[in-house]
Amino acid sequence: PRYPQYKDSGVDWLGQVPAHWEVKRVGYFFTERREKVSDRDFPPLSVTKNGIVPQLETAAKTDDNDNRKKVCRGDFVINSRSDRNGSSGASDLDGSVSLINTVLRPLDAVHTPFIHHLLRSHPFQQEYYRNGQGIVADLWTTNYSAMRDIRLGMPPLPEQREIAGFLDRETGKIDALVAEQERLLELLKEKRQAVISHAVTRGLNPNAPLKPSGLDWLGDVPAHWEVRKLSHLFRAGKGKNGQMLTKEFCGANPGEYPVYSGQTEDDGVMGTWDQYEFDFGEKGVLFSTTVGAKAMNLRQLFGRFSLSQNCMVIWPSSALCETRFFYYHFQPLFAFEREMIPDHMQASFRMEDLYGYRIALPSLSEQRAIVAHLDAATAQFDALTA
């Protein structure tokens, strides 16, 4: 419901506010806490977009001779760097934060949970970084001397408590809904992979007799399928210009043809170039990343393109193989092989690794039937996910 009366706050970012609210500077409601402490005596805290949390034990302690800022329970902490927009919150913990953060000690006229919502709101955060006055490490920063003059619309204390309680309840409901949706997405992802794995290792006929494949990743397969060494059926290649085709080069020499790399953002496209190294037309080719946490990340590419570093393309050298079928068939194989890499080692995927694998080979007609089945099934999973 609307309030009975409003007034102009005199501040662009606030606009109109209820007539009984105070409109005053940040400095009226807070003082800056500037006490320097050490993380040896005051536990290190991290200022994140989820609020103020204990610093992970894996993060190195600074041990920096009392060169951190003290934080007390109830203080509001905000990261002054513009690239950390949203990293802020009211602290439930005593501890210390790095000097790049501003620590505010609230006065008696404010309710901490209300302040947590108000100062983390998108309009305030925009106003906060707009008032920045200094550059640190090439980043726009906002210090307290600029922040304290930002004007806030502040309800009376009882109303602050009511608003904070309302927001805690409503955001709690939303968080629970988001968590449920994320759980459903994970279940859909697992189900999708299970459907793919079953179809490419058992086929579509549930009554087909099976035989041992002799391979851990494959298990039993239909008795009429062949188990073949991958090197007898496929070839792999890398781009000849991989070292030259960097993000900087593509930015300076853009064109109509995509350049793929080992990155996984933007569907692997790092940039464009006016030339191309590969042309696989409508039939397509299999593409895999080769280094890092996303090594053996598989997709199918079509048409003309080039490759940067940390990736390869894989294509059939035999007329017995349907490219699209092996896009699905390689997925459980690559997942199995990736799991075999020890956690302490950087994952890498070489051509000699690829050529050493063994795979199952149904007839071409069966490959095409499985592809039609999986294209339809995965489209349904993708629609549900969307």
Image (tube, rainbow, N blue to C red):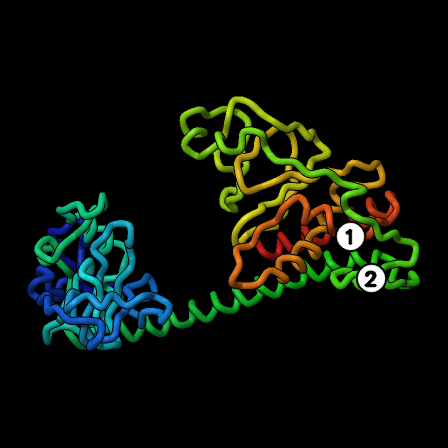
Q: Is residue 202 left or right of residue 161?
A: right
* Image height of 117 relative to 363, above or below: below
Q: Which residue is rendered at x = 20% and y = 55% of the image?
A: 80
Q: Nearer the viewer, residue 314 or 199?
A: 314
Q: Amino acid at mark 1?
A: Arg
Q: Please rate how many residues cluster around mark 2, counting C-alpha atoms within 10 Å: few if below 14, some from 14 to 19, many from 20.
A: few
The residue that mark 1 highlights is: 358
Whether residues under marks 1 and 2 lie with C-beta atoms below 8 angstroms apart, the answer is yes
Q: Amino acid at mark 2?
A: Gly
The residue that mark 2 highlights is: 214
Q: Quadrant of the N terminus?
A: bottom left
Q: Is residue 30 visible?
A: no
* Image height of 35 relative to 312, above or below: below
Q: Residue 167: where, in percent of width, then height?
A: 32, 70
Q: Secondary structure at mark 1?
A: strand
Q: Earlier in the sequence, mark 1 or mark 2?
A: 2
Q: Which residue is rendered at x = 28% and y = 60% of the image?
A: 87
Q: Which residue is rendered at x = 31% and y = 72% of the image?
A: 54
What's the CA distance linking mark 1 and mark 2?
A: 10 Å
Q: Nearer the viewer, residue 164 or 235?
A: 235
